[in-house]
Image (tube, rainbow, N blue to C red):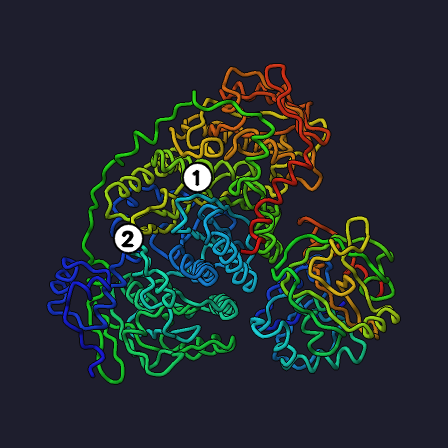
Amino acid sequence: MKCGVVVFPGSNCDHDCYHILKHIMGWDAKWVWHKDESLDGLDLLVLPGGFSYGDYLRAGSIACFSPIMKAVSGFAGRGGRVLGICNGFQVLTEAGLLPGALMRNRSQRFLCKFQSVRVETSATPFTADCAEGEVLSLPIAHADGNFYADADTIKQMEDQDQIVLRYCNASGEVTDADNPNGSAGSIAGVVNAGKNVMGLMPHPERAADPALPGSDGRKLFDSLLAFA
Amino acid sequence: MDPTACPEITDALLDEHNLSREEYQRIVELIGRAPNWVELGVFSAMWSEHCSYKSSKPHLMTLPTQGPRVIQGPGENAGVVDIGDGQAVVFKIESHNHPSFIEPYQGAATGVGGILRDIFTMGARPIALLNSLRFGEITHPKTRYLLNGVVSGIAGYGNCIGVPTVGGEIYFDECYNGNILVNVFSLGLVKADRIFLGNASGVGNPVIYVGSKTGRDGIHGASMASAEFDDKTEEKRPTVQVGDPFTEKLLLEACLESMKEDWIVGVQDMGAAGLTSSAFEMADRAGLGLELNIDQVPMREDGMSAYEVMLSESQERMLFVVQAGREDEALTTFRKWDLSAEVIGRVVEGDRMVISHGGRTVLDLPVKAVVEGGLAVTRPTKRPANLDDNQKLDLTKIEIPDTGKTLKHLLATPTIAHKGFVWEQYDHMVRLNTLVLPGSDAAVLRVPGTQKALAISVDCNSRYGYLDAYTGGQIASAEACRNVVCSGAEPIGVSNCLNFGNPENPEIMWQFEQAVRGLGDWCRFMDIPVVSGNVSLYNETKGEAIFPTPTIAVVGLIENADRHCTQNFKREGDRIGLIGQSLEEIGGSEYLKLVSSEIKGKPPRLDQALEKNVQALCLDWIQNGHLASAHDCAEGGLAVALAECAMSGEEMLGAKIILQSTLRPDALWFGETQSRIVVTYSPDDEAQLIAEAKKANVPFEVIGTVGGNRLQFQLNGDSVMDEAVVALNRIWTSSLEEYANRVG
């Protein structure tokens, strides 16, 4: 698997993603500078978490004008797999590659903790190795993860099986008390209609190294391998 | 008008610059003339308590700073300690108290930014942040605003730059009502042979300014931090700097990238007193002069005077000296990261700092006179007059309360209450090194690419220091070591942040002297070097000083990361043991404050020899894989420690505790006797552990068994408490969060 990790100014989970892809998964990983313009030869592109350009405006709203984003758009259009984690998810929605938007958490606070999420579909390259209804425990760490889309869009996403992860309790029940940020429908992760672009607020790369607490994040990376 | 012209020297003008008449005379003697306006400002900043350590230096000199692992002791941006295999850790703790009280979000945020620069200036990648915070009583009208502001400031900066905030502590006490404390610690990793120092050597080498543009913020911040607060404190808000973590992230990456090259001669961040202190200190360390041209300094706005540029404390700026002829490579690297970078001068022969602006010389001073010429200050000391009274405690007046009720009250006190809602606001996992999530005795991080891990703890109970400053300093350092040991690490280095009141008050200076002596005695006894630190004086408002608060950060090394230890009970059926011995020590305890509203008596004693043996035994047992958990007894004593062991795991586990004792029951359960660690282990190991403790001459008592979902205490055959762990946990985890979320 040939994969790239985009480095925007202000990306801060870039090293973490690179570590998991390269040293844990053993894939051929490389850095992609935000001023690069080509993604030729890659199978997977990861847009990592962080605070691109400081996120002083809206999270991801400046990064989506980075030179690399034209190439990302083309890459996604050709069916290349794109995984946007946290800030990467925000960038993908700002760029229009994924539906919806991510607003400030309803608590108005940054929140970092392990959080249960339920896998809603295994019919994506990112969850192929998971069972539908499976509960994963993944770290979240964000201030702007409150997913919003209008009712029609959400209906359409549901119809097309585009909702991949929902926040839930440890038994897999989706309740308001277990919605950490106020997201519509407790949505934690989505794919595009083509199922090759995924965005999620949780950090699978933080629960994929056997030396650290948590292991469920690994399942998303294993899925990519299984799908390939 | 001449921008360097100095108005008439009046007492008011000197006061504004925090300079005494004697100090002004000294300046005139040293430079052989009256200083101009810019020069006066420079002396004011460089001779401030904050920059010069004039009151504290004679005492700091007594601390042990050497050791086989020490690569760099105090005097540079941060201390450096060898951890083997060609790697070293760079760490320091620093205060940002005054700005945080005036503007909590930005004050705390820029505190984080400042300490991070100290670490990466030396070539290290910061991998951890911790903090030690002190707020006033929760009933004080400003406390909620300050707590929420400081926490979000730390979160705002640390989360954005992507360095995990992995631990810390928060205490609440009335003495901080008018003076909160924000002490921030950072640790970085570096190759032992790639350490960069703040040295402007090599005549002809260019001086390069890198980072944010200079604005008018933070002018005279160093002087502000060197004076007491009064009614006009609010007016000082414009002297608080504004942080930009995004630019600092770029600066961090640009610095670490450039440090892989061979053209850097020296580098220092522009912290307190900004360009002034970095330029003067770098030149002084090299014993050379500098010629700088202020016109080249990137500026945020037009019309800034030389005085403003030299004294601005705008954040996210660094000063580099690079090899002559390599300027273009340097500028290219920095500008790749979209940073402002300009050559602003050169290293020159001699010993003078000459600064020009608009074609004229605006400053011409001998470097040594500015950096080292300040008047040596020997502050008189005097034992506080009320100390004897404060140390008197009549226990007969305190009725023995119900154990369960008291425990619940203690768990809800803000100092003991669970701080989860605070650390959930900090990204504590980024960079993938966090082995132990916040909430155990110490933060534990792996050293990437090795089998090693680091444990870090910050600690200080200032009530002990108020009642006995020597013991306060001693216990702060011993307890921080104990926390690190409970995680399975051997302490290898100390950084201190000494927060005190006005040093011109002999009673405060006495506290300072005593606390430093206590810290030094423990560190000498254990042979642990103090490699970095910071002193924050004048922490008082309208004459009301804070309690002496010598915050101690200890870094420990774990050779085998798999053998780290945490505080929570792990397995049903495990036996619970207490290393150390409980004494009748209630003075200065959280319990005493709860039941009598007083801070009185003598604090717990520290028997250094016993403490050393207790720590050695506990560490040995962890390293040999005997212990399932270890937790030191601190505020709230044995009962709170046991409750924390029961509550803090992912799966809560109860315990049955059976004690025989002739002590007052409240002292037994809630007294804060030092040198005690609650441990759990398999019953199979019991005989061996008892024998080993006896051999090591360390008191060790089997006190109970892990199991069930209730915490049950039995004393001398009677049941004294039986509570569901989940109910205790509800009290422990909800009180502070509910307080912080309340509106109004």
Instruction: Give SS at disc 1.
Output: loop
Quadrant of the rendered structure where residue B624 is?
top right
Q: Position of residue B249 (x, y in %)?
A: 52, 67
Q: Is residue B500 left or right of residue A85?
A: left
Which of A38/B609 is in front? B609
What amino acid does circle 1 point to?
Answer: Asn
Indicate whether B158 appears above or below B319.
Answer: above
- Between disc 2 and disc 1, whose residue precedes? 2
Q: Is residue A177 left or right of residue B148?
A: right
What amino acid does circle 2 point to?
Answer: Tyr
What residue did someone put label 1 on?
B461
- Outermost residue, front direction? B744
Q: Is residue B93 left or right of residue B34?
A: right
The residue positioned 80% from the left and 53% from the top of the image is A135
What residue did someone put label 2 on?
B53
Indicate whether A214 appears above or below A11.
Answer: above
Q: Is residue B449 visible?
A: no
Q: Position of residue B727 (x, y in %)?
A: 67, 36
Instruction: Give SS at disc 2.
Output: loop
* Label 2 to label 1: alpha-carbon separation: 24 Å
Q: Quadrant of the N terminus of chain A?
A: bottom right
The residue positioned 19% from the left and 64% from the top of the image is B12
Crowd tier of the residue under label 1, counting other residues whose Cα lies within 10 Å: few below 14, some 14–19, many 20 or above: many
Q: Position of residue B41 (x, y in %)?
A: 24, 68
Crowd tier of the residue under label 2, counting other residues whose Cα lies within 10 Å: few below 14, some 14–19, many 20 or above: many
Which of B402/B606 is in front? B402
Indicate whether A226 appears above or below B85.
Answer: below
